[in-house]
Structure formats: structure tokens, C-alpha cells
Image: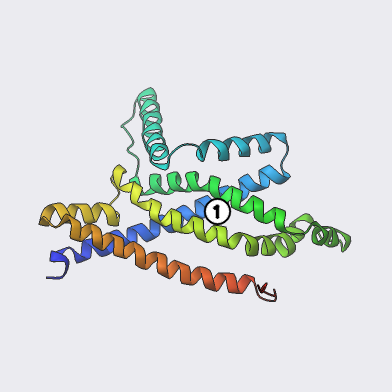
Amino acid sequence: MFLDGYANQVLTGTIETIKLAFFSLLVAFVLGLLAAAGKLFGNWFFRVWAQVYTTVIRSIPDLVLMLLVFFGIQQLLNAFTDAIQIDQIDLDPFVTGILTIGFIYGAYFAETFRGAFLAVPKGQLEAGKAYGLTKYQIFMRILFPQMMRFALPGIGNNWLIVLKATALVSIIGLADIVLVSQQAGRATGKMFFFILVAGVIYLILTTLSNLVLWWLEKKYSAGVREAKL
């Protein structure tokens, strides 16, 4: 029997991993954009907040941060429910995984976006002002499209890291591809085989991601001459 009868569980775990990575990417993208904008365009409060956020998050291992966030939020919820005398609220591993991974990698996206923003020539922004464009129009029509072209290589790297980091959520009980593979391996006595299956699935997902990223780079580089060595 294919995968010793665990094919459906492996497929479900793979879908869970893809959803977790995608929604974590959205959270990280938004937080990274806000932190980068805070560093470059914000007042002193937002600059300090963004600097502290990126420095602290990038200095602590991801696994430690995930455990801190998961158990820290759970303890706060327990204290809150005890204070108002209601039943305990248990965290959903999927939502917690999204928020934790997004929060962690938002710091890395922030540095990617900051460098991309700085790479856009200031003269083009001044030209937009001279034409009477609003700040929003300058951002959407001039700054953001060009920033994305410079940021895409970094975004691609961060996405691949986020995708692989989803393996960490198995420690908080989410039935992703890693946890499902471990359970199948213990049940069948074929731990190496099922962990290898998980590795192959991650390889397939990263390969498909690289193809999509290559297409996006071509799209955002339209009209830009490539440098020749």
C-alpha cells in the first residue's frame, strides 16, 4: 500500500505546511514593510521601535522565540482567564504558528525592504513631487514597484527560509508534514523513510517556489537591461 496507508495524512500535512508558510509570509511581509518604513520615514518613536524589533528578533534563535511566544501568550491568557474567572482558553497551534513565524521573519523582511528602498534613486521621487503627485501616488507608482524589483532576491530567500521554518511548529502540536511523518514513522517502524519523504516534499515545494520567484523577477525587471559581464 502506498506510504503504508499514510498517504492521506501526508497529503493533509503537506497542505497544512503550505497554508502555514503562505499566511506566515503575509504577516512577515506586512511587519517587514512597516518596520522598514519606520526606520526610514518614521519619527523617533517608530525608528526606535523598528530598530529594537529587528535587533532583538535577529539575535535570538527561532526555536527559542517560538517557544517564548507560544508559552508566553498562553500564560498571559491563563492569567487573564483566572482574573475574570472564566474557562481557560487554549491557543490554536495553526494561528500561533502563523503569528510566531510571521513575527520572527518580519524582522528579516524589514532589512530586505530597507535596503531596497534605499536603492531607489532619490531623483525619481523628487521628480514625482515636481509633477504634483501625492505621497501615496509616489509610493504606489514610483517607490514600491522599483523597491520590489530590488527586494525580490531577498524576498525569495526569506520565503524559502520561512517555508523550511514551518518544520519548527511541530513542537507546538501542529499536524504539519514533519509531525505527520514522525507519527507515521513511529507507527510503522520506518522513521528514516518517512522523514526522507518529508525532505523530498520540502525539496519539491522549494523547487516550485524558485520557478515562481524566477517568473516574478522577470516580471518586475521588464524594461530593465541586464548587466553583462
Residue 168: x %, y % from top left:
35, 47
Looking at the image, which residue is at 34% across and 44% down? Answer: 92
Instruction: Indicate how the structure is coloured in the image.
Output: rainbow
Looking at the image, which residue is at 32% across and 38% down? Answer: 90
Screen quadrant of the N terminus: bottom left
Number of numbered labels in the structure image: 1
Q: Is residue 163 left or right of residue 172?
A: right
Looking at the image, which residue is at 62% across and 37% down? Answer: 51
Q: Is residue 203 left or right of residue 221?
A: left
Residue 95: x %, y % from top left:
39, 47
Q: Nearer the viewer, residue 161 or 130?
A: 161
Residue 87: x %, y % from top left:
31, 32
Q: SS for tag 1? A: helix
Screen quadrant of the C terminus: bottom right
> Which residue is outermost to the front?
229
Is residue 196 depicted above or below 229 in this figure?
Answer: above
Residue 107: x %, y % from top left:
54, 45
Q: Residues within 10 Å of mark 1 (few under 14, many from 20)?
A: many
> Which residue is outermost to the top?
83
Looking at the image, which residue is at 19% across and 57% down? Answer: 192
Q: To which quarter of the image does residue 12 belong?
A: bottom left
> Which residue is outermost to the right?
130
Name the residue carrying label 1: 29
- Residue kind at label 1, given as amino acid type: Phe
